[in-house]
Amino acid sequence: MLGPTPTLIPHPRPPYQPKTNKGAIAAKFLKKRMLTIKDPRRKDVVIAERKAAEEKAKKQVSHVDQVSSSLFFKYNTALGPPYHVLIDTNFINFAIRNKMEIVQGMMDSLYAKCIPCVTDCVIAELEKLGPMFRLALLVARDPRFERLPCTHAGTYADDCLVRRVTQQKCYIVATCDRELKSRIRKIPGVPIMYIARHRFTIERMPEAYGDPKG
Ligand SMILES: [Zn+2]
């Protein structure tokens, strides 16, 4: 107890230490900086996303311009009798349900010779629908109908018909499908045939060419 009094060596003042744990701060910081694949801070992701958005916008913009259907015959002489009418699956079904003969009904509507055209995918759609639609399939295979071969994959007829009338403006499209009708309406100069009140009706057909309305 009674030893020499220990001399107090002053400790050098420790440097200022904030109370928070440095390691924890670093970890937090790193976590914040850590980038996942989908992290928007990743430059390439940002660029790719921007590109995708631009392409999407471009696609939306590049729709076909609306042109008055009255102008149609000024630049399209491909459409005239005999009319080539592209038939959709449901048009055949509607015609059968209404007990209407397709070739005769078309001629009565347009006062001209009509050649119904059936694509491979329409036939395939009818085949897929099963035995209930055997009669429709029989009608579609009518020898008076022109068969159009398809090169595309799948049996979705709507896209096929839209593509055909976009590429070749020599068809009338016969359909009762509301969605397909509105898609066709966006393509200038393609008349649409449908069934209303037990008769074939045509829209977007200049009066001089047998618009049967009224
Ligand atoms: Zn097709």
Image (tube, rainbow, N blue to C red):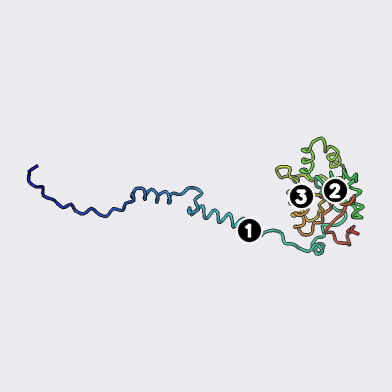
Judging from the image, what secondary structure is the residue with disc 1 in?
A: helix
Query: Which comes before the other along the chain, label 3 or label 1?
Result: 1
Say if disc 2 is inside 8 Å of ligand 1: no
Closer to us: 144 or 45: 45
The reply to whether the C-beta atoms of the residues labelled 3 and 2 are less than 8 Å apart is no
The mark nearer the N terminus, 1 or 2, is 1
Position of the C terminus, as image quadrant, is bottom right
Q: Please, what secondary structure does the residue beneath circle 2 have?
A: strand
- In the picture, measured across the screen, residue 45 lies left or right of residue 9, that is right
**In contact (CB < 8 Å): disc 3 and disc 1:** no
Q: Position of residue 35 (x, y in %)?
A: 46, 49
What residue is disc 1 on? 58
Residue 80: % across, % down: 86, 57
How far separated are the C-alphas under marks 3 and 2? 13 Å
Q: Nearer the viewer, mark 1 or mark 2?
A: 1
Taking the image in four quarters, ligand 1 sits in the one at top right
User: Where does label 3 land, which residue?
Assistant: 161
Work out which residue is located at the far front of the displayed protein and give it. Answer: 1
Q: Amino acid at mark 1?
A: Lys
Q: Earlier in the sequence, mark 3 or mark 2?
A: 2
Tell me what residue is drawn at x 82 percent, y 64 percent: 70
Q: Say which residue appears at 7% left-offset and 43% top-offset.
A: 3
On the picture, is 61 further left or further right than 24? Answer: right
Badge number at residue 132: none
Q: Please, what secondary structure does the residue beneath circle 3 have?
A: helix
Q: CA distance from mark 3 to mark 1?
A: 23 Å
Q: Which residue is mark 2?
A: 116
Residue 36 percent across, percent down from the top left: 48, 48
Q: Quadrant of residue 98?
A: top right
The residue at 81%/55% (across/down) is 170
